[in-house]
Image: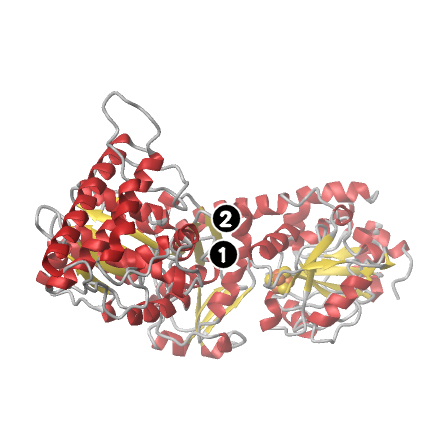
Amino acid sequence: MSKIIASAAIRGSNQIALQAEQFVERVRNDKGEGVKIGFPDTAYYLPMAYALMGLEIKTLEELKPVLAHIKSLLSKEPTEKLWFPYLGATLDAGIATLLAEEIIVCLRYLYNEEPQPGCNGFFTDTILRTLGVQLVDGRMPGFAAILGAAPDNETAVKVVRDLQKRSIMVFAGSSTNGRSVIDQLAEEKVEMGWDTYIVPYGRDTISAIFPLNWAIRAAMTFGGLKAGQARKCLEYCKNRVFAFGLTLGEVDDFKYATGAGAIDMGFPIIADTDIPQILPTGICTYEHVVHEFDYDKIVPRCIEVRGVKVTVSEIDIPVSYSAAFEGERVRREDMHAEFGGKNALAFEYVRMREMDEVEDGKIEVIGPDIDTITPGSQMNLGIVVEVAGRGMQTDFESLIERQLHHFLNYAMGVLHMSQRDLLWIRLNKAAFASGFRLKHFGSIIHARIHDVYGKLVDKVQVTVLTDDAKIKEALVTARKAYNERDARIADMTDESVDEFYSCSLCQSFAPNHICVVSPERLGLCGAVNWLDGKAGYKIDPTGGNQPVLRGRTIDPVRGEWEGINEFVYQHSNRTIERMSLYSLMDAPMTSCGCFECILALVPEANGFMIVNREHPGMTPCGMNFSTLAGSCGGGNQIPGFLGVGRLYVLSQKFVSADGGLKRLVWMPKTLKDFYRERFATRANAVGVPDLLDRIADETTATSAEELVEFLTKSGHPALEMEPLM
Ligand code: SF4
């Protein structure tokens, strides 16, 4: 606690308490002790005294215990030389201030001094309820009480507009050197009122009690708390009412005293002047007093310090946006632009950053936009999403990244498939004609991440890259992160954990599909591993990642358990009765459409081939990737065909029930190159160190006959293994 702040707050509280006492005396002389007092349209009497002291004050006489309580809370300013703990005294001074201010503004009503000209004055219970609904349904994420005046009108408007943009209700008032933000806004013709979310409460600091005694009523109205439950009412405000004070200009003793009262309620103070900061957490959720001199940053700083969860109620895009469009396809002939897929490069990457490294809402497009291309053609694309938040962890990056699939697919005319650097997006001609451009990917991602991950993420900025050099540069960082995420799980085994995790994200395209993700078998898309499933469950215990208990073992070799069968049956619309985790031939997992690769049986070779999405050519099973995907995707369970993540091949559990790695007889050369370094360890473990060279690729075989010929020459072990069929 800063001694400067403590001294000023205590000084201020003594002065305000004296004013209250003198005002009561004046009313007693003018109107007598029995005079009725109170605010208009409220059932909460003097709300602060009612909530904190349980008193139903209706007459001047009934203020006596309040005045006595105020007195008991006041203390002397800490002296120059005497040092003692003054946090408690300062917080008490804050409560004394709130009670005293409430008395003053209440008594002003007896002399028609409230509401002040052009101000709202007391917030009625009707307003309280209307605001409460908006608070509960998320239309209004927080409340700002501005005290003072900005250095100029332009800055005042900017600050208020920045708050409005985030749907934060603004209570404007108080003054600095005789000038109030209310007048600055009025001079600039800013419309004020409940409809515009800008409410002038009064031109002096004492009237800042109006928003505060509205907040304390919320604890009783919406929190179900009773009058007199002081501590609980204050805690309710801290935990449920996302308010903060923003002081503009010099902070005098009255503002410090009122600020101390706000802090008692869990509302931090952010100042634009060089006041001492109180950074440790304690009474407020995060910092208590903070200064920020940059008016471009002051509103984001307020949001950060109070932990306001910004919601974006409307996504600013020129096409419809709804879950109904998620399964929509974009055919080649309807396509305006295609990113990734076979003919272009595309990736998406969500990266956690520090708070001061992210500018919330910043959307930047680097490179040419889609109006520069011939309709129906391809472009390279990188989508880099930087997020920051007090609840954010690097473990959540890949989860949020995987959700981009949903987020972008909800836009009418956008098709999003796959993930990481295998991303494939198509945009149709109608969306382009409506005005959809690359920046709109950013608008969607910014809004949806705030909506879905508001508890974790406070800031989101999106960079959309089409400049090839920039894409190349960013891809290096993204790929490093993908590898690090994969490496985190590398040493874990299925036996080392009690539960696996499900993933149902792809049910929008394949309603019967459910991935069961274990430490040794990642999701088909290659972007969700067991740690991601666990993190997903932690973030949203009722979401798409659920723990799956194995239960009684049916067959440890095939990887079949009663618990998993039951879970899969219930979550596949009761269509899949059995699932074995380690077999391609007997009850394999279903395949959605997002798989990185497809494993397929080649009966002639007594083994399996694997083909990756990027491979355009023919394979020895007589089908290319697209035809194979069409046959086994969509949530089907087809023995001998299975969508898999690339890294599953390197797992000890890779089709272990069917003979494991030694069954692999063919893969495209690009996959060989991808595996080469890591393949050696597994090849040694299965006793065939040069296995990768004995596996055929498109340069040696594209038909079953050529494949068998190559395998015979290379001495592939599959030819000697037990028959698969
Ligand atoms: S492929 Fe599986 S793990 Fe990946 S997003 Fe789809 S359901 Fe989840």
Q: Position of residue 259 (x, y in %)?
A: 27, 45
Question: Relative to residue 652, is residue 724 drawn left or right?
Answer: right
What amino acid type is highlighted by mark number 2? Ala
| Residue 91 vertical placement versus 105 (above, below) | above
Q: Name the residue that disc number 1 marks.
A: 347
Question: Residues under labels 1 and 2: Cα distance?
Answer: 8 Å
Query: What secondary structure is found at the residue carrying circle 2?
Result: helix
Question: Relative to residue 714, is residue 280 drawn left or right?
Answer: left
Q: Name the residue that disc number 2 marks.
A: 478
Query: What secondary structure is found at the residue carrying circle 1?
Result: strand
Q: Quadrant of residue 90?
A: top left
In front of the other: 206 or 335: 206
Whether residue 397 appears in this view of the structure is yes
In front of the other: 724 or 51: 51
| Residue 8 vertical placement versus 166 (above, below) | above
Q: Quadrant of residue 124?
A: bottom left
In front of the other: 639 or 55: 55
Total marks drawn?
2
Q: Are marks 1 and 2 in contact (CB under 8 Å)?
A: yes
| Residue 311 vertical placement versus 179 (above, below) | below
What amino acid type is highlighted by mark number 1? Phe
